[in-house]
Image (cartoon, helix red, strand yellow):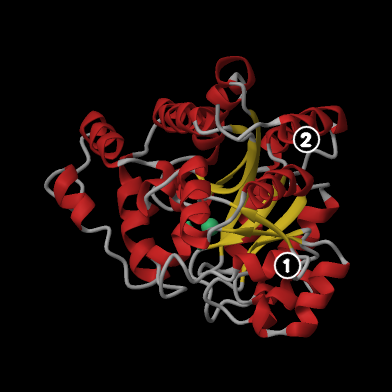
């Protein structure tokens, strides 16, 4: 039985495995830019975040109908549950679909068709976090939030993703203020490729409660002190960082030092179809390459539930935390 964990940094579109991408493309009469799944897998050799994002957005073209989004979510939940995921806070990128003419309602209804039954079918409690593409305009983000109003009962929070450098968090001040006024939780990718100053800005200007990645925070010791003091969780993604060359090798992420510093780190899979592993694979990889012992792994699992947006269901959080403490490796 795998260690129980919460997945807090997972893009549902990043779980699109090549086989499903081709099946959906065939179903919808869409031609993908690669001949077959082998050719596609050979293209998973990324230089940086941008080179990954280009392929990631291209493959989404096969996602058209509610059933496509439902199939995507169902495949993810089955894999996640088999690897110990008990709670998943799932990102989606509405603009990547609405720009292609797919309605926001199609995306949310399709995902929710499966997420709404995830607990009974997969034993995974789900949340949805709607991300704005930071390389699109602030007006486009505001329009997306407006379009999401009919679906807010299914959306827990907002996030910020896509190409980071040159798109600082402050660009999205207004939409985050509006999201807060609607009672939505706030997270943002920051310090993945961008500087530590983007992390500070995400905290101060956007009011984020959790930082996605935060990998570069150790470059600013004062920021580390603040993140520790304020117990701001970081959702690290070690396989992603290695594959997108944000670090030199998988042995490089400063995770042990960050835990030693008292940072509330969690380990996540980001876009697992592209980066070589789901939640359990990721934990295995950091255990092997960084030499984490069992108590460190338990700490990461505990952190994941502490950092989750289960404030609306503390009983459930306590149950999951008890499972972590009772776990025998
Ligand atoms: N979208 C999907 N994965 C991402 C990542 N690692 N960084 C930014 N945007 C993303
Ligand atoms: Zn991400």
SS class, disc 2: helix
SS class, disc 1: helix
Residue pictured at 39% horizontal, 62% vertical: 53
Q: Quadrant of residue 108?
A: top right
Is residue 260 rendered to the left or right of residue 314? left
Q: Which residue is mark 2?
A: 321
At which x and y percent is residue 35? 11, 47
Q: Residues within 10 Å of mark 1 (few under 14, many from 20)?
A: few
In the image, residue 99 sits, relative to residue 323, either above or below, namely below
Q: Which residue is mark 1?
A: 260
Is residue 257 rendered to the left or right of residue 223? left
Q: Residues within 10 Å of mark 2 (few under 14, many from 20)?
A: many
Q: Earlier in the sequence, mark 1 or mark 2?
A: 1
Residue pictured at 38% horizontal, 63% vertical: 243
In the current view of this chain or complex, which residue is farthest to the top? 120
- Can you tell me whether the CB of the residue at mark 2 lies under 8 Å from the nearest atom of ligand 2? no
Label disc, if present, on residue 50 of the rendered structure: none
Is residue 128 rendered to the left or right of residue 231? left
At which x and y percent is residue 304? 70, 46
- Can you tell me whether the CB of the residue at mark 1 lies under 8 Å from the nearest atom of ligand 2? no
Point out the frontmost of discs 1 and 2. 1
Q: Looking at the image, which is closer to me, 171 or 59?
A: 59
Looking at the rendered image, the quarter that the C terminus falls into is top right
């Amino acid at each position: 039985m795998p260690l129980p964990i919460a997945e807090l940094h997972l893009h549902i579109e990043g779980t699109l495995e090549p086989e499903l991408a081709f099946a959906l493309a065939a179903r919808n009469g869409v031609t993908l830019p690669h001949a077959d799944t082998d050719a596609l897998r050979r293209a998973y050799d990324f230089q940086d975040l941008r080179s990954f994002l280009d392929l990631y957005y291209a493959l989404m073209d096969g996602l058209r109908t509610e059933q496509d989004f439902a199939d995507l979510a169902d495949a993810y939940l089955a894999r996640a549950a088999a690897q110990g995921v008990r709670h998943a806070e799932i990102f989606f990128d509405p603009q990547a679909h609405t720009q292609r003419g797919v309605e926001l309602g199609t995306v949310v209804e399709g995902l929710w068709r499966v997420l709404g039954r995830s607990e009974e079918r997969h034993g995974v409690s789900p949340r949805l976090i709607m991300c704005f593409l930071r390389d699109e305009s602030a007006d486009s983000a505001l329009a997306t939030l407006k379009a999401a109003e009919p679906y807010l009962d299914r959306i827990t929070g907002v996030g910020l993703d896509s190409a980071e450098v040159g798109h600082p968090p402050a660009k999205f001040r207004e939409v985050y203020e509006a999201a807060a006024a609607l009672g939505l939780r706030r997270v943002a990718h920051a310090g993945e490729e961008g500087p530590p100053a983007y992390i500070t800005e995400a905290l101060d200007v956007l009011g984020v409660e959790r930082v996605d990645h935060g990998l570069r925070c150790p470059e600013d010791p004062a920021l580390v002190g603040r993140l520790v003091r304020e117990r701001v969780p970081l959702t690290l993604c070690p396989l992603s960082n290695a594959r997108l060359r944000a670090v030199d090798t998988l042995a490089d992420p400063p995770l042990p030092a960050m835990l030693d510093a008292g940072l509330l780190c969690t380990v996540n899979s980001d876009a697992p179809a592209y980066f070589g592993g789901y939640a359990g694979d990721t934990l295995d990889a950091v255990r092997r390459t960084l030499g984490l012992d069992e108590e460190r792994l338990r700490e990461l699992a505990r952190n994941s539930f502490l950092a989750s947006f289960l404030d609306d269901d503390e009983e459930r959080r306590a149950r999951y935390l008890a499972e972590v403490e009772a776990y025998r490796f």
